[in-house]
Image: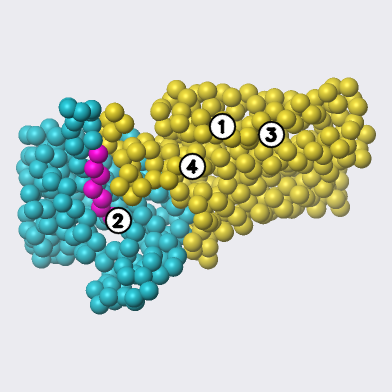
Amino acid sequence: MRWGMAIELKRCIGCYACVLACKAEHFLPPNIFWNRVLIGEKGKYPAVTKLIYSVRCNHCADPKCVKACPTGATSQRADGIVVVDEDKCVGCRYCMVACPYQARSFYEDGHGDQHEYFPGQGLTEHEKIGQILYPHQVGTVQKCVFCKERIDEGLAKGLKPGVDRDASPACMNICPVKAIHFGDLDDPYSEVSQIIKEKKGHPFHPEFDTKPSIYYID
Amino acid sequence: MMQIKPWDFMVKYTPQREWIEGHGIMVAFAMFFGGISGGLYLSSLYFHSELGTLIAWVFSGLAGLTDMAHLSKPMRFWRMLRRPNSSWISRGFILIWLFLGAALIQMALTHWAPGNAWEIVFKVIGGVLAFGVAIYSGFALGFVGAIKFWNSGLVPILYVISGVTAGLAVVILVSLNATNLYVVGNYLVVALIAYAIAVATYFWTATYSSSAAKDSAVRVLKGPVVLLGIILPIVMVAPFSLKQNISQAVFIIASVFTVLGGIFLRYVILKAGMYTPLLPDSES
């Protein structure tokens, strides 16, 4: 089993809902992004194309971050999900430097604006609840975990990730245009495998040679 | 250095910040202290300078301390000893600790039991570990495929040569009254020339390896580091060394510039690190 994603670029409208859903799901502090939307342009007027890429950790099969980590805080689960154990992270940030996709964020030990969405106003109720339900350690590296909690709990209930909402990543659930597909890449009959095969999905920058688990469909 | 706007992140050339801004600057110092420690220890063994080996030992300790100062969770430093099978940071940290132990024993033997067989054994062990301490940071950078400017097999070589050069400069500073100072000066000139060739080769290869690496190389070359840290010391020391005519003032100034050049070279290499944009043809 290897969890993966397929993202249809022609469907994506760049609404940032995936970014916000991720923020809400994991109670991410300000300046921490596990998911980003990159928007650029290609070509010159009048032949200009807008590029919109929803990006996050690629959960590579050959992850540079895992090799770089000096403590073993970053590791890869049997299902391919790359995770960070905040209790083991020393904050050396070698994993961040090593990631060619720059998919990691560092939770800095800074002033109030690093920890409060409304600096100087104190934490909102949502932020307070987040510190209890999903605490993040200051001074550690953060990244997308493919909503592993939802996957693990869903599987325990007999649900199917990528099919059942309760077992699927928040970014996939929220996407209003269904541009994000999730599932088992090792299962040739899963929806995600079928879409990648039929629509010729390709990894983002295969030249980085990390074998990403996220495929993009032009 | 260009400042990247949040919406330009990885859409345009994005400078690395993790290892240069805030506590990140400690990485530059750790790399410098590691390099000069290894180079100075090897140079001191060659020129039989006990004071030099002691300073090399102190520099190695400073390399370990600055490494730890960079960590946001320094009390967990012991965890960095656990992944030598894959991580260059872990390997470097272990090398520093082993070097500190081996060099301490060697210095004690050299001082209190010179000529002892164990002294030779620990000189060899210390020398090998010193080489490791000098080179590991080069491998740590060379591993980073994300930053094309660093991702070069020449970086470890450059860092060792830089370490040996700075080490020789320190040997000169601690041997100013020695009669053979011009000999050390000759070695320094040769090392500086090798250093200049290594830097030139590294930058030259960077200019055609990728557009990001070229951009980084140009940024470094625009600064005064190469001129003041390498060229100037060669021009200053060479005439005096070749004529075997010792001018302490010239040797001191050239040595200080060489050491400072070693610090700033590491700083600018880290500062010039750029990630290639992720969006296809976003530069067009």
Q: Colour of chain A?
A: cyan
- The residue pinned by badge 2 equals A33
- The segment highlighted magenta reads A33-40
Q: State the SS at label 3.
A: helix
Letter of the yellow chain: B
C-alpha span from label 4 to label 2: 24 Å
The structure's colour scheme is by chain
Q: State the SS at label 4.
A: loop
Residue depth check, mark 2 versus mark 3: number of the one nearer the observer: 3
Foreground residue among B256 and A172: B256
**Can residue A20 be seen here?**
yes
Q: Is residue A104 left or right of residue B267?
A: left
Q: Are marks 4 and 3 in contact (CB under 8 Å)?
A: no
- The residue pinned by badge 3 equals B228
The quarter of the image holding the C terminus of chain B is top left
Determine the chain carrying the residue at label 2.
A
**On screen, B5 above or below B23?**
above
* Type of the residue with mark 3: Leu
